[in-house]
C-alpha cells in the first residue's frame, strides 16, 4: 500500500473526531466510541496487529483514564471544599479588588497563574487549577474551559519542569547516532523552541480576551476584548521576556515556571495601581447569569452567598493554591519526588504484549489536590458536614465525566501502539506524518508544527507527541537539507499548540467544571488560536531555515508578515469598530 493511502487511513480516527465531535457537536461520550472502533478496526484489519496487543493498548488506555479521573476528582474536591468553606468568596473579592474587569482577570489567572502551574506540574494540571478558579469567580464554565485551553500553548514545551523537552524530545532522538551530546542538543533545541514561542505567544493574551468577549459577551464582539490590547501585550511580555532569558541561560526546566511567576510579580501590582486597566464604564463583565446561553454552564454550580463575607481571610483563602504550587514544585524537584514515585501500581506486559501500565499514585497531582483539600478542611475550620458535602458533590461530577474518557484514552493508545503488525506498516502516527512530509517537500517546515499538533491532538500530551515524532522530524530535516534541530524545535512548538484542541485535554478540562457533552463547542472556539500558533511558528521556522538559501523574502517570511500585518491592522482599527458598536447601542 502506498504512503499516501496509508496516511489517509491513519487519518480516519481523527476525521471521525473532527466530523462528529467538532462538526456535528456530538458529545465526546458518543463521538469517541466511534473513533475508538475505527482505530481498532484499522489496527486489526489494515495494520494486521495481533488482537492481544490491541486489547492490551485498550486496557492501558483505561488505566491512564483512571489516573486522569483521579486528577480531575482532586481538582473538583479542592474547588468544592473552598466553596463550602467560603474561601472562594474571599478569592472572588480579592480579584475584584485587583480589577473588576473580566478581561484583566482572565489574563492574570489563565495566562500568568496558568503558565506558572504548567511550569510546575504540566500534564493538564493548569486546567484543573485555573478553570475551576475562574468558575468560582463567576465565569461561565465554557468560557473558563476555553481560556484554560488557549494558554496551553506557550508554556507547555517547558511544562512539568521541562518534561516535554527532556523526556519527550530526549527519548525521541536518543537513538540517533548523529547526536553525540544529547544534553547539548536538547539545550540548543530548547533555545530555538523558546524563540518560536516568544514570537507566537505574544498574541495569546489578545486571543484570550478576544474570544472571551466574542463568544461570551453581550455584543458578541472581538473588538471589546481588543480594547485592552495594551494590557494584554504588557502581560504577554512580562511572562515571555523572562521566559526566553531563562531558556537561554538555564535550559528547559524553568522557562515557564519562572516566566509565569515573574509575570505575576510584575502584572498584579501594576493592575492594582490601574496601569493600562479599564476604569468606570469601560469595565467589562458578563451579562446576568439568567441571560447566559445554556451551553455555557456545567453541572458544577457555585454559590455566591454573602454569608461568607469576612469569614475567611485573604491569606487563608489563597493558602490552598499556594500549597498546591509549592507541593507540586517540591514533588518534582527534590528527592521527595523519588520517594513519591516509589509507591507505584504496575501492570506489566498486559496480555503478554510489550505494553505495560503503571500509576505513581502519590506522585499524581490528584493526590496533592486531595491532601491540600484535607489541609483546607482544618485550616478553614470547616464543619464535617460541609466537607462531606464537598466529597459527595465531587463524586457525582466525576461519574459524569468518566464516560468520555474511557473511550478517548483507549482510542489514543490503540492509535499509537500499531507498530509491529503483520502488514509491516509503521505505526499510525508515523504513517500519517510520512504522508504529509512526502507531499510537502521543502515546504515541510511550515507543516512540521501541524504534525506536532496532530500528535498532541491524539495523544493528549506534548511529551508523547515529541516522543512519537522527534526522531521522524529530525530525519525529515536531514532529507530536505534543513537544520534538523530547527525541525525538531518546530515539532515541540506544534506539540505544545496541539494541547489547545486535543480531545483528551478538552474532556478533562470540561469535566472539572461539569461541562460534559459540550466538548465539540469548546474545540470550535480553540481551533483558530491553534491554527494561528502553528502557522506563525511554522512560517517563522521555514524562514529561519531557508533564508540563507532562498533570501529573506521567502514563503515563510511572507506568511509571517501577512499574519502580523493582519494583527496590527485589527488592533489599529479597533476603535472604529468599537464606535460602531456604541452607535448601534444608541440607535437601539
Image (cartoon, rainbow, N blue to C red):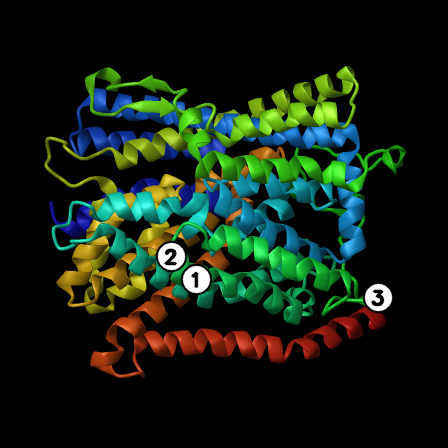
Picture coordinates of residue 317 (x, y %)?
Answer: 75, 37
Give the residue number, with chain letter if any, for mark 1. 197
Please report contact status of discs 1 and 2: CB closer than 8 Å, yes or no.
yes
Residue ID at (59%, 25%):
370
The Cα atoms of the two marked residues, 1 and 3, are separated by: 35 Å
**In this rendering, position of residue 490 left or right of residue 49:** right
Give the residue number, with chain letter if any, for mark 2. 493
Is 141 located above or below residue 201 in the figure? above
Give 114 or 428, whichever is nearer the viewer.
114
Q: Residues within 10 Å of mark 3 (few under 14, many from 20)?
A: few
Residue 97 visible here: yes
Please report contact status of discs 2 and 3: CB closer than 8 Å, yes or no.
no
Mark 1 / mark 2, whichever is N-terminal: 1
At numbered mark 3, what does the secondary structure look like: helix, strand or loop?
A: helix
Give the residue number, with chain letter if any, for mark 3. 281
Is 358 located above or below residue 511 in the figure? above
Q: Quadrant of the C terminus?
A: bottom right
Which numbered disc, 2 or 3, marks the residue closer to the eye? 2
Residue ID at (31%, 53%):
451
**In this rendering, position of residue 297 left or right of residue 462:** right
At numbered mark 2, what does the secondary structure look like: helix, strand or loop?
A: helix
**Which residue extends farthest front?**
335
Picture coordinates of residue 320 (x, y %)?
Answer: 67, 35
Picture coordinates of residue 285 (x, y %)?
Answer: 77, 56
Residue 214 visible here: no
The Cα atoms of the two marked residues, 2 and 3, are separated by: 39 Å
Mark 2 / mark 3, whichever is N-terminal: 3
Q: Which mark is residue 283?
A: none
Amino acid at each position: 500500500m502506498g504512503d499516501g493511502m496509508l496516511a489517509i487511513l491513519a487519518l480516519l480516527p481523527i476525521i471521525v473526531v473532527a466530523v462528529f465531535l467538532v462538526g456535528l457537536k456530538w458529545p465526546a461520550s458518543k463521538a469517541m466510541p466511534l473513533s475508538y472502533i475505527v482505530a481498532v478496526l484499522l489496527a486489526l484489519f489494515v495494520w494486521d496487529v495481533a488482537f492481544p496487543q490491541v486489547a492490551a493498548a485498550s486496557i492501558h488506555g483505561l488505566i491512564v483514564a483512571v489516573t486522569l479521573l483521579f486528577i480531575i476528582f482532586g481538582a473538583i474536591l479542592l474547588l468544592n471544599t473552598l466553596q463550602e468553606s467560603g474561601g472562594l468568596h474571599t478569592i472572588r473579592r480579592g480579584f475584584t479588588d485587583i480589577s473588576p474587569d473580566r478581561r484583566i482577570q482572565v489574563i492574570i489567572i489563565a495566562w500568568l497563574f496558568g503558565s506558572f502551574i504548567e511550569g510546575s506540574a504540566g500534564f493538564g494540571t493548569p486546567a484543573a487549577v485555573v478553570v475551576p478558579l475562574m468558575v468560582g469567580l463567576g465565569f461561565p464554565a465554557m468560557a473558563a474551559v476555553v481560556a484554560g485551553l488557549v494558554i496551553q500553548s506557550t508554556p507547555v514545551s517547558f511544562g512539568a519542569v521541562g518534561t516535554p523537552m527532556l523526556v519527550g524530545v530526549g527519548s525521541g532522538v536518543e537513538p540517533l547516532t548523529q547526536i553525540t551530546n544529547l544534553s547539548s542538543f536538547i539545550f540548543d533545541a530548547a533555545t530555538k523552541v523558546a524563540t518560536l514561542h516568544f514570537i507566537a505567544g505574544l498574541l495569546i493574551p489578545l486571543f484570550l480576551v478576544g474570544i472571551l468577549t466574542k463568544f461570551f459577551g453581550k455584543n458578541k464582539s472581538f473588538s471589546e476584548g481588543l480594547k485592552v490590547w495594551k494590557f494584554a501585550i504588557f502581560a504577554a511580555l512580562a511572562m515571555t521576556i523572562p521566559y526566553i532569558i531563562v531558556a537561554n541561560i538555564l535550559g528547559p526546566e524553568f522557562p515557564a515556571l519562572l516566566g509565569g511567576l515573574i509575570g505575576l510579580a510584575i502584572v498584579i501590582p501594576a493592575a492594582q495601581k490601574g496601569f493600562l486597566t479599564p476604569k468606570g464604564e469601560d469595565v467589562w463583565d458578563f451579562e446576568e447569569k439568567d441571560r447566559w446561553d445554556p451551553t455555557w454552564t456545567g453541572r458544577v454550580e457555585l454559590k455566591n452567598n454573602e454569608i461568607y463575607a469576612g469569614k475567611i481571610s485573604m491569606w487563608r483563602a489563597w493558602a490552598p493554591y499556594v500549597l498546591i504550587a509549592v507541593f507540586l514544585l517540591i514533588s518534582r524537584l527534590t528527592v521527595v519526588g523519588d520517594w513519591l514515585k516509589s509507591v507505584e501500581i504496575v501492570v506489566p506486559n498486559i496480555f503478554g504484549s510489550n505494553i505495560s501500565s503503571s500509576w505513581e499514585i502519590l506522585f499524581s497531582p490528584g493526590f496533592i489536590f486531595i491532601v491540600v483539600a484535607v489541609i483546607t478542611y482544618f485550616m478553614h475550620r470547616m464543619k464535617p458536614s460541609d466537607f462531606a458535602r464537598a466529597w459527595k458533590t465531587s463524586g457525582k461530577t466525576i461519574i459524569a465525566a468518566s464516560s468520555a474518557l474511557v473511550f478517548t484514552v483507549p482510542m489514543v493508545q490503540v492509535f499509537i501502539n500499531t507498530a509491529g503488525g503483520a502488514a509491516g506498516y509503521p505505526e499510525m502516527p508515523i504513517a500519517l506524518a510520512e504522508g504529509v512530509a512526502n507531499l510537502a517537500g521543502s515546504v515541510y517546515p511550515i507543516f512540521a508544527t501541524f504534525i506536532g499538533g496532530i500528535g498532541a491532538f491524539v495523544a493528549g500530551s506534548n511529551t508523547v507527541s515529541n516522543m512519537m515524532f522527534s526522531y521522524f522530524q529530525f530525519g525529515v530535516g536531514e532529507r530536505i537539507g534543513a537544520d534538523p534541530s530547527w525541525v525538531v524545535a518546530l515539532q515541540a512548538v506544534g506539540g505544545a499548540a496541539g494541547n489547545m484542541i486535543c480531545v483528551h485535554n478538552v474532556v478533562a478540562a470540561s469535566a472539572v467544571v461539569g461541562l460534559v457533552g459540550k466538548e465539540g463547542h469548546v474545540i470550535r472556539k480553540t481551533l483558530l488560536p491553534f491554527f494561528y500558533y502553528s502557522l506563525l511558528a511554522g512560517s517563522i521556522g521555514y524562514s529561519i531555515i531557508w533564508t540563507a538559501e532562498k533570501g529573506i523574502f521567502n514563503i515563510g517570511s511572507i506568511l509571517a508578515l501577512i499574519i502580523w500585518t493582519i494583527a496590527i491592522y485589527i488592533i489599529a482599527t479597533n476603535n472604529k469598530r468599537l464606535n460602531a458598536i456604541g452607535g448601534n447601542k444608541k440607535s437601539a
